[in-house]
Image (cartoon, rainbow, N blue to C red):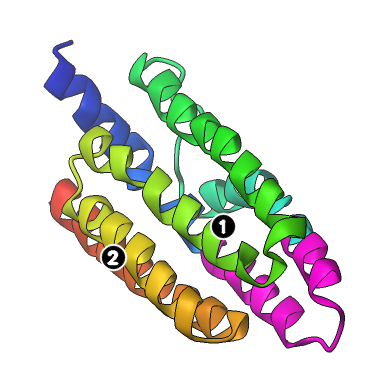
Amino acid sequence: MSLEELRLDCAVKQKKGLHFILVSVVIWCAVLVVQLIDIPVLTKNLYTFCCTAPLLPLAYFVSKIIKVDFQNKGNPLTNLGVLFSVNQMLYLLIAMWVYPTVPEKMLMVIAMIFGSHLLPYGWLYKSKTYIVLSVVITIMALIIGLNFEAYILAVMMIGIEIVFSICLWIENKKLCA
């Protein structure tokens, strides 16, 4: 298979990662709930980290519902997609530093890390949605995070992730048409 055929195979079999983006809506809803609770900011930050923990098992569950080949072992580019995600773990060290240092900005940093880590998936899945929304999420997280309360940022992320899901659904429809 050529590189382009492998990319197309990833996009089709993994539905351009739609299962992860759908689950991110749920994760950001949980983060919003945490942000609305009247508890100290350091506790909110801890609970926010905890909200992200079920991402992988929930994405696996959603992949079964929407019929995604979660592992796509026959395609070597799947490992590249995993590397794109694992790379985000290194960036979370920045968020861990922000956690006690500038705690009121930790959610902004997490949102920026989340947005920026999506960019390479634009190439992998041949997706304009990933490219555009990666940049939009990162810049909007910075602007909203600097100027508004964290719960506003969480609301924004929910809205963007819903739009993201719809755009990916449309891209997938066109891909399979």
* Residue 169 visible in the snapshot: yes
Q: Helix or strand or loop: what does disc 1 sit on?
A: helix
Question: How would you rate the neighbour count of disc 2 (Cα within 10 Å): few for under 14, some for 14-19, many for 20 or more?
Answer: some
Where residue 160 appears, x then y in whole percent?
A: 38, 73
**Magenta-colored segment: predominant secondary structure:** helix
Q: Residue placed at 66% from the left, 55% from the top?
A: 98
Work out whether mark 2 precedes mark 1 in sequence or the reverse, and give the earlier one: 1
Quarter of the picture holding the N terminus: top left
Q: Residue placed at 39% from the left, 22% from the top?
A: 80
Name which residue type carries label 1. Ile
Quadrant in which residue 60 is drawn? top right
Quadrant in which residue 141 is drawn? bottom left
Where residue 92 appears, x then y in whole percent?
A: 61, 43
Q: Which residue is mark 1?
A: 110
Where residue 65 appears, x then y in whole percent?
A: 54, 54
Q: CA distance from mark 2 to mark 1?
A: 14 Å
Vertical order, 50 against 126 (above or below): below
Quadrant in which residue 37 is drawn? bottom right
Q: Closer to the camera, 13 or 76?
A: 76
Q: Which residue is mark 2?
A: 136
Q: Is residue 154 magenta?
A: no
Vertical order, 82 against 32 (above or below): above
Q: Helix or strand or loop: what does disc 2 sit on?
A: helix
Q: Residue placed at 61% from the left, 84% from the top?
A: 151
Vertical order, 37 against 58 (above or below): below
Say left or right for 24 vs 174: right
Name which residue type carries label 2. Val
Q: The magenta stretch spans which residues?
A: 24-49
Vertical order, 25 against 19 (above or below): below
